[in-house]
Image (tube, grey):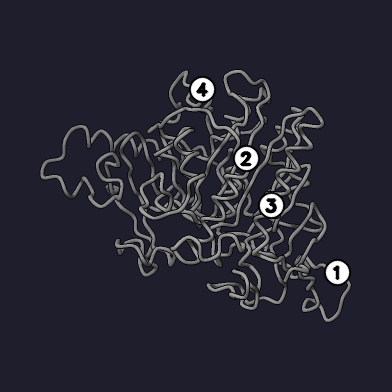
Amino acid sequence: MGVLEALFLALAAGLSTARSPNIVLIFADDLGYGDLGAYGHPSSTTPNLDQLAAGGLRFTDFYVPVSLCTPSRAALLTGRLPVRSGMYPGVLRPTSQGGLPLEEVTLAEILASRGYLTGMAGKWHLGVGPEGAFLPPHQGFHRFLGIPYSHDQGPCQNLTCFPPDTLCSGGCDQGLVPVPLLANLSVEAQPPWLPGLEARYVSFARDLMADAQRQGRPFFLYYASHHTHYPQFSGESFTERSGRGPFGDSLMELDGAVGALMTAVGDLGVTHELASSLDLLPTLAALTGAPLPNVTLDGVDLSPLLLGTGESPRKSVFFYPPFPDEIHGVFAVRSGKYKAHFYTQGSAHSDTTADPACHAASPLTAHEPPLLYDLSADPGENYNLLESMEEISAEVLQAVKHLQLLKARYDAHVTFGPSQIARGEDPALQICCQPSCVPHPVCCNCPDAQS
């Protein structure tokens, strides 16, 4: 089960002494943990990310609730399962009528209430809505520079991804409206000049930090890079530099951005404690003294682990598929070293994996008893203990019963919110730099001067 998004958290002030530490939250897109030198890749050029991993706290058992853009980002910012906020099934599109409900309390809103200057750069993908109702400025961010959804959700075949003139490759939506770059609620460019986009985000981030310092207040920067999601792109300084092609150049630019943003990371070591992106909101609330929202949270406070004063309180992780429903509930449960799959279903995104059960042709399959894996010895989930063991031990049998009980209890207590994605689509919601132009929407084209 590959990790599609990687998370790195840096606190620019000492956690043990600072009352209001500055916070930089970096969220990469479609980056596998094995793509980094810190996790064993033999040729990745990622010195800044590797230094961050070496000097900070490196998690080896860190999960996102769903390996898809929209639900994963909703969970990160709310500390709640995406099914609670209605961020299912699949992902939001430029024409989607739904978005992250405004009654959901985001990490930015919590920190803004504590006097933080909050800013976001990069990929939002949590909805646009009428008059930009779901965009970051309405979700707790004082400043926003970014693309409101994925940068492949618009025509890109004629766009330059690598200077001077290498066109974008890879799958892109064949719509008529180019992706917009927004500054708060205003269109900066449509489409933006992709080779200059990351540098633009870094400049925005630096300005946010400098302004916070001048104002004498802490800052929270959510830096949601588009790298390394397809189509890959990079600026001139990184093009054909990595030796790993477009993906490597894109990753190298992300690493350069991290190097520009990170100034200090505490020496905290390595942990094999279980953790999830759901845990960021309660953890940062604890570190900053911010009150928790009066809602059911699925994350836990990891601050004792970060500060070296205790262990992770997280003992289990629950896994939903990209298209969840209340009938089947969670598909898999992890507790300690054991993980059980109660249902499996293939996906086109997994057609290149060795396991045929993960391929698109594999239908929804119930497993009774569940597939059971010991992740401490078999992290690739290749050997089902209930089939591979000649004699099933009492420990394994107890693990199965425990995981079955966890699933039953969890499914019984989780209430799905109304699906925001099922609200349907409205082409009129597509952002246009010239709202009254004709012929619409072909005329929605205000490219950067650089292009």
3 or 1: mark nearer the eye? 3
| Mark 4 or mark 2, earlier in chain | 2
Residue 290 against residue 62 in the figure, above or below: above
State left or right for residue 200 relative to residue 231: right
- Residue at the spot 40% in from the left edge and 40% down from the top edge: 407
Of marks 3 and 4, which one's residue comes earlier in the chain?
3
Query: Do the CB atoms of the residues marked 3 and 4 lie less than 8 Å apart?
Result: no
> Which residue is nearer to you in this view: 77 or 190?
190
Residue 88: x %, y % from top left: 57, 54
* Disc 1 residue type (three-letter): Pro
* Residue at the disc numbered 1: 435
Secondary structure under the numbered disc 4 in the rendered image: helix
- Which of discs 4 and 2 lies nearer the camera? The answer is 4
Q: Amino acid at mark 4?
A: Leu
Tell me how far mark 3 sits from mark 2, CA to CA: 23 Å
Which secondary structure lies at badge 1?
loop
The image shows residue 287 at horizontal and vertical percentages of 61, 25
Residue at the extreme right:
436
- How far is the residue under mark 3 from the one under mark 4? 30 Å
Determine which residue is flagged by label 4: 307
Marks 1/2: CA–CA distance: 32 Å
Residue highlighted by disc 3: 201
Mark 3 and mark 1: Cα distance apart in space? 25 Å
Q: Label 2 belongs to which residue?
A: 78
Residue type at the position of mark 2: Thr
Q: Position of residue 52 (x, y in %)?
A: 50, 39
Q: Nearer the viewer, mark 3 or mark 2?
A: 3
**What residue is rendered at 55% in x and 64% in y?**
239
